[in-house]
């Protein structure tokens, strides 16, 4: 799925959350979406969090 379509659906869902639940629901949906995005990047191997989580470097 192209990134523009993903962005479109994300915007539509955030707008729907804002209309239905108010600003709190909008912010909560945006935060959970960001967390899901980061988890997806880590699982796919595109993001390495080892330096930030106190993991040992390579070669030690």
Image: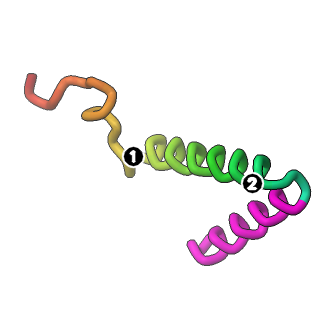
- Position of 4 with respect to 42 (left or right) is right
- Position of 12 with respect to 8 (left or right) is right
Asked if the stretch drawn in magenta spans residue 48, the answer is no
Between 4 and 30, the one lying in front of the other is 30
In which quadrant of the rendered view does residue 36 lie?
Answer: top right
Residue 48, compared with residue 33, is above or below; it is above
Q: Position of residue 54 (x, y in %)?
A: 27, 24
Q: Residue furthest right?
A: 20
User: Which residue does the image show at 8% across and 28% down from the upper left?
Assistant: 59
Q: Position of residue 45 (x, y in %)?
A: 39, 46
User: Which residue does the image show at 57% across and 50% down from the upper left?
Assistant: 34
The quarter in which the C terminus is drawn is: top left
Asked if the stretch drawn in magenta spans residue 12, the answer is yes
Q: Residue furthest left?
A: 59
Residue 16, compared with residue 32, is above or below; it is below
From the image, tell me which residue sits under label 1.
45
Residue 44, compared with residue 13, is above or below; it is above
Between 49 and 25, the one lying in front of the other is 25
Magenta span: 1-19
In which quadrant of the rendered view does residue 7 lie?
Answer: bottom right
Q: Position of residue 50 (x, y in %)?
A: 29, 33
Q: Residues within 10 Å of mark 1 (few under 14, many from 20)?
A: few
- Position of 1 with respect to 16 (left or right) is left
Q: Position of residue 17 (x, y in %)?
A: 82, 56
From the image, tell me which residue sits under label 2.
26
- Cβ atoms at labels 1 and 2 below 8 Å apart: no
Circle number at residue 31: none
Q: Residues within 10 Å of mark 2 (few under 14, many from 20)?
A: some
Between 9 and 28, the one lying in front of the other is 28
């Amino acid at each position: 799925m192209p990134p523009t379509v993903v962005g479109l659906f994300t915007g539509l869902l955030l707008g729907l959350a804002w209309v239905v639940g108010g600003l709190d629901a909008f912010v909560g949906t945006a935060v959970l979406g960001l967390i899901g995005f980061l988890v997806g990047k880590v699982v796919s191997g595109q993001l390495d969090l080892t330096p930030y989580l106190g993991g040992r470097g390579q070669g030690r």
